[in-house]
Image (spheres, rainbow, N blue to C red):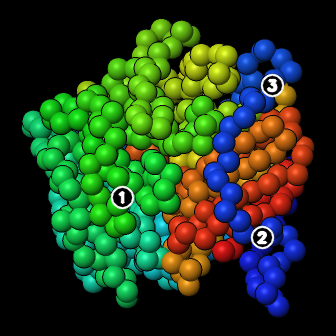
Amino acid sequence: MKRLMLIISVAVASGCLAAVIMQMSRTSNLQSTAPLVEPSAKPLIPKFADVAKRIGLSSPSNGPVCSANAAGSAWIDLDHQGAPELLLGSYAGWNVAWSVSAGKATPVQNLGVIKGATGLTVADYDNDGWDDLLVSTQSGPRLYRNYSGQLKDITASSGLQPHKLGMSAAWGDLNRDGLLDLALIQGNNCVGESNTGFHFGQMHLYTQRPGGRFVLSDSLVKPAAMPALGMAVAWTDLNDDGWLDLYLANDNMGGVGNQAWLNKHGRLVEGFPSANISINSMGIGLGDVNRDSRMDLAISNIEPMNLLLNHPSKFKRERLASSLATHLPITWGSVVEDFNNDGWEDIWSAAGGIEGGAADSQVFYLNRGPNHAIDDYAQPAGISKHHRGRSVAVSDINHDGNLDVALASLNDRPALFMNKGASRKGHWLEVTLKGDPAFKSPRSACGARAWVSSGLLKLMREVGCGSEGFGSSSDPTLHFGLGVSLATVKLKVRWPGGQIKHYKLQPDRHYVIKE
């Protein structure tokens, strides 16, 4: 199915907005009402097929058994040709960007060997309209600016310091000035070619100044992040006040649990102690799992995954087991998305062992709504083949309304799981948001929040820039599964700078909306 892409630009003419846009109002955030009733109680299981080998996608993540805990993957729009490229990182090998189209993977740019590379984080940090790249490495962050399709290393002039033991990073606008800021995570449980014990790192916060230079701003975080085995970090609005908060996932082998901070007008203060769980956290998934318009957290783990449901005063913790699998694999990067377009967000998690990089089945938790348990359907979904999974990055690369998944593995070939959809096709909507720095919104719209209303269905999504997963960046396009609803879609967007806009859209289409 060919995807129809429409571009909407908000223009003011004679004091009126374009006809497609509704007038701004002071309405409150959309809240979930009655659940979307499925015509059948049978699980709608999406079917995936790994096509990486067939289309020629390679680039194994070579590296030491233990040091290469992260194997980065990212979707990045290098050339403005309408389809993002897949960037695959490697701890000791080549870091290559691939064009995936017409059933073939073609290498389009090689960044060469970036020694100790772990995480890949994408955003247009300088607001020039081109996606840039931050590479986390064991010797310090590397910043690559996109010059009309070519990535060039500008770390030396960026202001970023060579913090060692880099694992991952995330972009977000801390102070709502329209300039993207950066949270960097350090920490590893071994360094070098073999396990040499715990090596604690520190989370660092950088704020961006006009002109594109970054300033170390750890003093804005109170209490400071404790030295730990940091694994992942996420910018997300936990209390829905329009300011991006920060969540840090630590591997508790270092004795330090996760930490959450609330954003108080550009300063991070302690908040949500109920989210500060102590587990062997690896990656962070973000989504509204129970459709109450609050951001929930899916935390990967050595033991059962942990789901933190966001309630008004605290997080409620649930452990996700599996009644279908013979054992619980170690999970790493996780994403929360609606993979079968039934209106409920599911959880996909990369899985693989630690010692020796043992391969394992990937994990797919199917969300069937409030009357059903969230359970692992990896085998019937077609993703039970064993991999040394580490990071996942999501994009609808063939424009059919079904989200596809790139999987980067430790010392193994990557996988590209094409989503063929479920037996009953659900309707969908995809929206790419482009912020306007004139209104204090970053061009990548990191942190923008969107609410959809279609019939009885009410959904919430948020633009993340490296905040979800583990050393990875998914396509920032917002995906909404609409289930059986074919009604006109009402979309409400709260832009990062604070503006609220309303739009009327049609289902089964992809829109690019400019602030």
Which residue is nearer to you in this view: 61 or 189?
A: 189
Q: Which quarter of the rendered picture does the C terminus lie within?
A: bottom right
Nearest to the eye among marks 1 and 3: give it.
1
Pinpoint residue 16: horizontal percent, then vertical percent.
81, 82
Residue at x 82% of width, y 52% of height? 489
Residue position for label 1: 263
Q: Residue furthest left?
A: 196
Name the disc covering residue 23, or none: 2
Rendering quarter of residue 250: top left
Name the disc covering residue 247, or none: none
Which residue is nearer to you in this view: 180 or 399?
A: 180
Do the residues bearing badges 2 and 1 touch, measured as CB atoms within 8 Å? Answer: no
Which residue is nearer to you in this view: 228 or 136?
A: 228
- Give amino acid for label 2: Gln
Assess disc 3: are there few (<14), some (14-19) or many (≥20) residues with their C-alpha within 10 Å of its C-alpha: some
Which residue is nearer to you in this view: 319 or 125?
A: 319
SS at circle 3: loop
Residue at x 87% of width, y 74% of height? 19
Whichever of callouts 1 and 3 sits on the residue coming sooner in the sequence is 3
Left or right, 123 with reference to 234: right
- Give amino acid for label 3: Val
Left or right, 94 with reference to 15: left
Q: Residue furthest front?
A: 26
In the rendered view, tell whether residue 393 sits above or below residue 305.
Answer: below
Rendering quarter of residue 115: bottom left
In the rendered view, tell whether residue 30 sits above or below residue 483.
Answer: below
Assess disc 1: are there few (<14), some (14-19) or many (≥20) residues with their C-alpha within 10 Å of its C-alpha: many
Residue position for label 3: 37
Marks 2/1: CA–CA distance: 29 Å
Nearest to the eye among marks 2 and 1: give it.
2
Marks 2/3: CA–CA distance: 31 Å
